[in-house]
Image: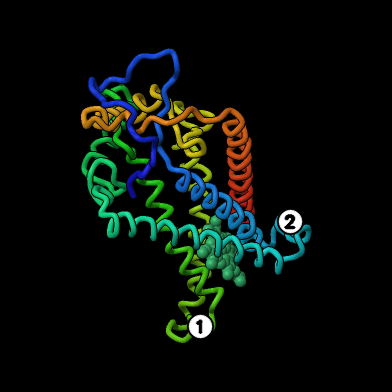
Amino acid sequence: MTDETGARPAQQPESSGQPQASGKEKYYVRFTLAQRYLHVVLFTSFLGLAATGLPMRFSDNPTARFFAREVGGFGAILFFHKFCAVVLTLAFLYHLKDIATRSFVHKEKGIFWGPTSMVPNWKDAQDLIGHLRWFVGLGPKPQFERYAYWEKFDYWAVFWGMLVIGFSGYAMWFAPFFAKFLPGWALNAVLVIHGEEALLAILFIFSIHFVNTHLRPDSFPMDMVIFTGKETDEEFQKKRTLEYRRLAAQGKLEAKVGEKPVYWWVNFARVVGFTAILIGLVLLVLTLIGYFGNA
Ligand code: HEM
């Protein structure tokens, strides 16, 4: 739940706490390669689950029927859905293993509490209020640590959603097994829970998460940091001012310096990222049409 960025080792001691001015733009590592790959696996499997789950949810809809026919029928859709579900489950389990290893084996500090933790704290509540005040011109813009309150919110929404959707999905998949210890009504309930929680997740990810991370003015049209793993000195100072200052004061800033992302990789990531955002927005529109069209 904290960073483990694996940036290049420190080349020189940090002295002043301020970045050295130089002609070359400086980059800092925010996400490791493993974290970036995990995010790719997460969003591709999620897009796959949404694209296959929606036709099942709105199976009366002509567009859903057309889509199902084109990919080999609802049997094929369910097969792809289960395939993506296994991929997403593996990614989730990998993440849990990563947290457990870092906290209990490597004894990494600050995973569950402190400035780099994903666990919400009192400052997040203050930041939320401060941000609302700033929106209406009643106060200064809050400054953020490693993870801002909305990033923690996004993380826990997905974490919690994964448990609910995952459990209900497996209960449907392996209904005869779950029927041994769940009452009959519960097996009916899991279908409703799965379908409704899935719609909530789709609406949340393709609207709030997209706006929070990519479409807000600071990052528009897309925050590349989740693909390149790096951000410029200017971005780091502006977006995560408190983390920047803390690392500088602790003399740890230079250890975060990384190489400039390679040009072809940035362009490739842009194509992948924009495609994912576009598919997500199309699915969002189809969800709204399916929901209100059938209401
Ligand atoms: C571990 C994760 C998951 C598993 C094991 C799983 C499994 C399943 C299964 C077995 C069904 C078929 C139910 C039937 O036979 O009628 C289903 C339906 C569905 N799934 Fe998933 N699923 C998972 C995650 C997701 C996610 C993340 C989404 C959304 C992004 C999603 C959206 C849906 C929808 C909308 C339906 C149709 C529900 C309905 O008919 O009301 N699923 N899922």
> Label 1 amino acid?
Phe
Circle on res. 67: 2
Question: Would residue 133 be visible to someone looking at this image?
Answer: no
Q: Position of residue 289 (x, y in %)?
A: 63, 49
Numbered disc 1: secondary structure: helix
> What residue is at 51 percent from the left and 47 percent from the top?
37
Residue 180 can be seen in this image: yes
Q: x, y (%) of residue 265?
A: 58, 34
240 over 38 or under it: above or below: above
Determine whether 24 is above or below 50 in the image.
above
In this rendering, would 227 be left or right of 158?
right
Where residue 168 sits in the image (x, y, percent)? 48, 69
Q: Residue at x 51, y 38 (%)?
A: 227
- The residue lying furthest to the bottom in this view is 180
Q: Quadrant of residue 221?
A: top right
Q: Quadrant of the C terminus?
A: bottom right
Return the residue nearer the eye: 4 or 138.
Answer: 4
Residue picked out by circle 1: 177
